[in-house]
């Protein structure tokens, strides 16, 4: 199993490059026929187009939200393994633990193109796909290297082979890691995509819609708010930005500056992650935001749902929430920070407090719920992260 999958891992870069001119293959759920292979479709894992749709869909809304929270717990455990500070990594992180993806990308690989749905992960450097003949791979669809004229094996001495998967977790269907580490897929395809990409995540509610991932600088929007992109040596795969303050309603919430401080020594700061669902704020920041939100809710009866501790089982009028980043203020519509039940009778603030200890206790994570229906631009050469409202679902 390992030999085959490793071969696939190391040849993925070559495959991506050679599939550029090809790939007009139309799978069942294709909406647009004219996709090029640098313009990929993103679907939510629960979409009817997703064979990875979990059984939890039959659960109640409450249970679905609890399930999202337990996925986030696993995700954050995984993110803590991506710290260069090995001593702080929890030993419980399984070597081959599996992780449920939130969003999957329809990737066209090989010549002629084969279509695979792989997990999208902006904090992971690894690209991995299951190959046909792989013993022990549980994926329904595998990549067949024999059918690709551009498939190549790399020798074990190749630099890519130093890229270990230690402490990593593997979504069984394959992974498109778009992290920024030195041996990442992005770094290796730099001559082609210039370490530039943007994506728009479709709403978790509009399951029939697809968002998009654009690779390379060509198609990227020019009219977009941007903030400087920072690199933190402690956690080299992550996209860091400077979050300065948060406004709830008209008031800028009182948060100690240390809660948002970027620190290359501890890995503290604010990152964007596509794999976490609910935004996590370091504890004093979360408490301050939550308390101001609750204050504005006045007499509405407060309730909780798992780790979401600010829920209301009645109609509420929600204030605006603005995140003030360095050089860029982003005011979010309700659907980016309030999760509502299907009937709209229950509403929860879709944010959580970071844990009390460990490497994640100093990490603010702008998660996928807060990113949906926005285009997020990552421009590494110009050290910029952009955000533009874009209803992609
Ligand atoms: C809250 O309840 C009190 C007492 O019933 C009432 O006087 C007040 O106006 C209410 N406040 C809001 C914001 O509804
Ligand atoms: C963001 O909002 C703050 C507070 O209102 C303001 O001082 C600042 O100039 C704004 N920044 C930008 C880039 O608009």
Image (tube, rainbow, N blue to C red):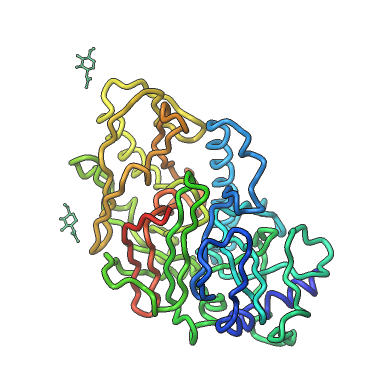
**Residue at left offset 45%, top offset 49%:** 203
Residue 285 in picture, x, y percent from top left: 34, 44
Q: Nearer the viewer, residue 272 or 57?
A: 57
Looking at the figure, which quarter contains the N terminus? bottom right
Observer able to see residue 153 = yes
Look at the picture and state if 7 lies above or below 258.
Answer: below
Residue at (40, 47) in percent of width and height:
282
Q: Is residue 271 left or right of residue 133?
A: left
- Where does the image place residue 135, in percent across and percent down from the top left? 84, 65
Residue at 52% from the left image edge and 50% from the top image edge: 208
Q: Residue at x 52, y 32 (%)?
A: 306
Height in image: 37 above or below 243? below
Q: Position of residue 280 (x, y in %)?
A: 43, 47
Q: Is residue 88 visible?
A: no
Nearest the eye: 188 or 289:
188
Q: In the image, is residue 373 above or below residue 231?
A: above
Count of labels in the image: 0
Question: Which residue occupies the foreground of this view, 23 or 318?
Answer: 23
Position of residue 311 in the picture relative to residue 169 (left or right): left
The residue nearer to you, when weighing 299 against 313, is 313
Q: Tell me residue 67's x, y (percent).
A: 58, 39
Q: In the image, ligand 1 is in what quadrant?
A: top left
In the displayed structure image, the side of residue 52 where residue 311 appears, left or right = left
């Amino acid at each position: 199993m390992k030999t085959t999958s490793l071969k696939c891992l190391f040849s993925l870069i070559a495959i991506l490059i050679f599939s550029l001119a090809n790939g007009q293959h139309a799978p069942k759920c294709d909406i647009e026929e004219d996709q090029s292979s640098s313009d990929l479709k993103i679907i939510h894992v629960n979409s009817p187009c997703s064979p990875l749709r979990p059984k939890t869909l039959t659960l109640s809304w409450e249970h679905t939200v609890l399930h999202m929270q337990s996925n986030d717990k696993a995700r954050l455990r995984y993110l803590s393994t991506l710290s260069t500070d090995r001593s702080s990594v929890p030993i419980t992180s399984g070597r081959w633990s599996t992780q449920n993806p939130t969003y999957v990308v329809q990737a066209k690989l090989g010549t002629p193109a084969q279509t695979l749905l792989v997990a999208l992960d902006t904090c992971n450097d690894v690209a991995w796909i299951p190959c046909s003949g792989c013993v022990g791979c549980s994926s329904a669809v595998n990549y067949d290297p024999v059918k690709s004229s551009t498939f190549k094996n790399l020798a074990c001495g190749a630099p890519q082979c130093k890229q270990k998967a230690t402490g990593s977790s593997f979504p069984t269907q394959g992974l498109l890691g778009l992290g920024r580490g030195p041996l990442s897929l992005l770094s290796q395809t730099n001559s082609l995509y210039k370490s530039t990409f943007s994506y728009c995540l479709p709403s978790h509610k509009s399951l029939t819609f697809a968002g998009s991932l654009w690779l390379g600088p060509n198609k990227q929007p020019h009219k977009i708010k941007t903030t400087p992109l920072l690199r933190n040596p402690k956690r080299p795969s992550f996209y860091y930005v400077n979050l300065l303050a948060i406004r709830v309603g008209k008031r800028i919430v009182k948060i100690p500056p240390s809660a948002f401080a970027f620190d290359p020594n501890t890995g503290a700061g604010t990152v964007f992650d596509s794999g976490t669902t609910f935004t996590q704020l370091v504890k004093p920041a979360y408490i301050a935001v939550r308390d101001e939100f609750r204050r504005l809710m006045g007499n509405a009866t407060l309730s909780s749902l798992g780790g979401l501790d600010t829920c209301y089982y009645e109609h509420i009028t929600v204030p605006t929430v603005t995140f003030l980043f360095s050089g860029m203020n982003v005011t979010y519509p309700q659907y980016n920070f309030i999760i509502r039940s299907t009937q709209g009778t229950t509403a929860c603030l879709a944010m959580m407090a970071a844990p009390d200890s460990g490497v994640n206790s100093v990490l603010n994570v702008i998660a996928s719920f807060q990113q949906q229906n926005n285009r997020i631009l990552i421009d590494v050469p110009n050290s910029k992260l952009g955000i533009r409202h874009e209803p992609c679902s």
